[in-house]
Amino acid sequence: MIEQRNLILAIVLSVAILLGFQFLYEMPRQEQQRTQQATQQPTSPQPTTQQPAGAPPVPVPGGTTTPAAQPGAPAPAMLSTALRADALAKAPRVTLQSPRLGGSISLLGGRIDDVTLSDYRETVQPNSRNIALLSPPGTSDAFFTESGWVAGETGTLLPDRDTLWRASRDTLPAGGSVTLSWNNDQGLAFERIFALDANFMLTVTDRVSNTADKPVTLYPYALISRTGTPPTLGFYILHEGLLGVFGGSLKELTYKDVAEKKKVEQKTRGGWLGITDKYWLVALIPDQQKDVQTRFTHATPDRIDRYQVDFTGEAVTVPAGGGTETTTRMFIGAKQVKLLDAYGTDLKIDRFDLAVDWGWFYFLTKPIFFMLEMFAAWLGNFGLAILALTVVIKLILFPLANKSYRAMSKLKILQPEMMKLRERFGEDKVRLNQEMMALYKREKANPAAGCLPILVQIPIFFALYKVLFVTIEMRHAPFYGWIKDLSDQDPTTVFNLFGLIPWDPGVVPVIGPFLLLGAWPLIMGVTMYFQQMLNPQPPDPVQAKLFQLMPIMFTFLLANFAAGLVIYWAWNNVLSMAQQWVIMRQAEKDAAKKPGGAAKAGKT
């Protein structure tokens, strides 16, 4: 039993150290970095851009193949921090008309630089703004996609960021398409056809016709450009930044990684690449049957961080009187699990589901998510789904828990005998341990069995935490009462009497996060305390005191966790108490039936 308590305490202290480091060091440090990024301009030098042998240069973010301005000579088209509305008004546009996507396509450059998500708002408030995912060049947070051609030889006039395209219609409805056209007056006619599905996928077909008297060599390309380093949550369990699947393997690079390496290249066939936030993804999906050269790059052409994800296809020679086309798909939207899975299956996109950061416990997190979603569909609420999932997990673990609780009940019954041995051999530690082991063997008791349910539930706990933290389906999912978002922490706190006092304890330096102690963490702590009362208490007074502190420690540690996770833990404690009480009562009855057992059972 001593080994059991030590193991439990080691787990608790490990979690405490881990979370303490996160809240007391990592989060303040990250907040300081964000403040510095907002008030200072980076001073890193302009990197030298090297292209693979034989390939033409890919356009710089939002521009042509002309090199970006050097530090001290800002690029005039990108320096402005105009308001979004002003930037959008600078070019004629084709309006996106979809139940799920709003925004427009700019005819200046023929790029997608204005996308809002109709289903998602910034906060739980119904009047908050819709999520604006893409923004046009000229804004401080420019974020857009481009596609087209780069020339294999100099002198070929191609459409660039200043090209004004002509559109076949003013709107692009879901299920429809729009054609942009432009002629270089040198024998090359270009078309860019945008098609939009009912969700978040656009198909972009770039077509060129050669009416000149000689062939021309072109390379297809597509890119995603993002201006500025966006604020990230900075959690070690969540990837935010650049990513892609190449050769069946996921590659993830943080913004810091790309800024340090400047350029990361890889040749591949199939797969996809993009930029991800916690819930949102902008991704390029090239032709899955063709080889492409992919790049993750970082530059500071005007002392502002620019991140770019792009690919270049193989050279295409367009003969005189001939034509060619290339198709790229662009995902711009929310990382809905079933939608990503469907795209991956229907469009044969390799491992597209890995856009969601399932983590190391992939084999647990994804099944748990699907079970939660199934229960939510039946019960109409993700909070109720968590309660139902907890019951299922308890049923699955019942054989193990049943064995464990029986072992714990046996230890509790044996406590009087153990106390006698401690009084008799307390000074002789070797003899005491020998007598304890003999008692365990004689009564067929296992002092380590009680920790098995805890060990088994640790990966389940972290898997559920991961699901609640990273899946868009949990975002702003309400429960009953004051819980409006199961993916966020309990918004109440006992330190302002649950909102009766107009004061935010979270602003207190250092300990602020631990003062946000809501109602559900308190409920969880109470259930943990009563569950502990059913367990055999450590005979050592120091260990007994530490054991009694565990509910208090967990109450504060879990206060900043997602409310859904705390609800799971509290409900799991209630179910465990019921199961444990029944098993222990039965064990005491069985012990009382044995010769000499009534005295033992009566003393517990």
Image: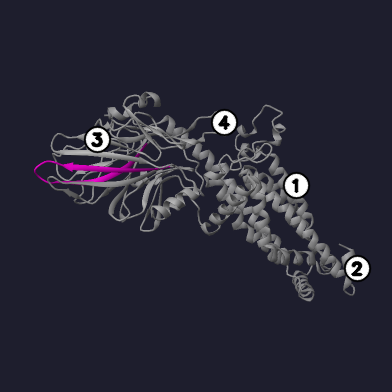
Going by the numbered disc 1, the residue's amino acid type is Val
- Quarter of the figure that contains the C terminus: bottom right
Q: Nearer the viewer, residue 122 or 525?
A: 122
* Residue at the extreme left: 213
Q: Is residue 83 visible?
A: no
Q: Is residue 123 left or right of residue 598?
A: left
Per the model, the C-alpha gap separating discs 3 and 4 is: 40 Å
Give the quarter of the image for residue 509.
Answer: top right
The numbered mark at residue 599 is 2
Q: Give the mark nearer the N terminus: 1 vs 2.
A: 1
Q: Position of residue 411 (x, y in %)?
A: 78, 66
Residue at the image point whose x is 60% and y is 39% from the top = 485
Which SS class for mark 1? helix
The amino acid beneath tag 2 is Ala
Which secondary structure, mark 2?
helix
Residue indicated by mark 1: 526
Q: Which amino acid is tagged 3? A: Ser
Task: Determine the main secondary structure of the stretch shown in magenta.
Answer: strand
